Amino acid sequence: MSNFKIAIDWSIKTVLGLKMLVLSDQFFTPFKRTMRERLIRDLDAKGVLVWAVEGSDMAILTPKDDPRLARFEQDGQVGGVWTDGDQVTVLPIQNKKRSAK
């Protein structure tokens, strides 16, 4: 099984199965930029939003349409805030082009 397939299967099982925000500090380690972008697109199509952290192998994953995620767009940049009860996670700013729609 390829790293790509493992990442897809793990993401769907973990994020959609548990309905939670998941932080992975090594998510993109085995992938070059083009494969990272494909992974983001493929997971988006399957209902998982991948929030890439620029300059690292880290990713934050959430269910795509989860109401606990508020997204903000301005001047080609996208930011996000995840709230779950009294816990708040501020997601790093991304270029709009790289964020899932």
Image (cartoon, rainbow, N blue to C red):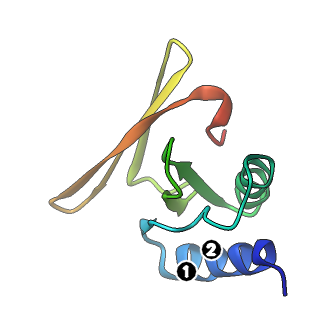
Q: In which quarter of the image is the N terminus?
A: bottom right
State the CA–CA distance, disc 2 to disc 1. Answer: 5 Å
Residue lying at 59% horizontally and 54% vertically, measured from the top left:
50
100 or 5, which is in the foreground? 5
Q: What residue type is labelled 1?
A: Thr
Q: Is 83 left or right of 91, judged from the image as shown?
A: left
Report the disc number at residue 43. none
Q: Where is 90 relative to 44, above or below?
A: above
Residue lying at 51% horizontally and 23% vertically, measured from the top left:
77
35 or 75, which is in the foreground? 35
Dot 1 lies on which element? helix
Q: Is 68 left or right of 15, judged from the image as shown?
A: left
Q: What residue type is labelled 2?
A: Ser
x and y, in percent, of residue 6 in the image: 73, 81
Report the disc number at residue 11. 2
x and y, in percent, of residue 88 in the image: 23, 53
Residue under pointer 1: 14
Q: Where is 36 relative to 70, above or below?
A: below
41 or 27, which is in the foreground? 27
Within 10 Å of disc 2 (Cα), the crowding (few <14, some 14-19, many 20+) is: many
Q: Where is 92 relative to 74, above or below?
A: below
Residues marked 2 and 1 touching at CB (< 8 Å): yes
Question: Does residue 80 show up?
Answer: no
41 or 29, which is in the foreground? 29
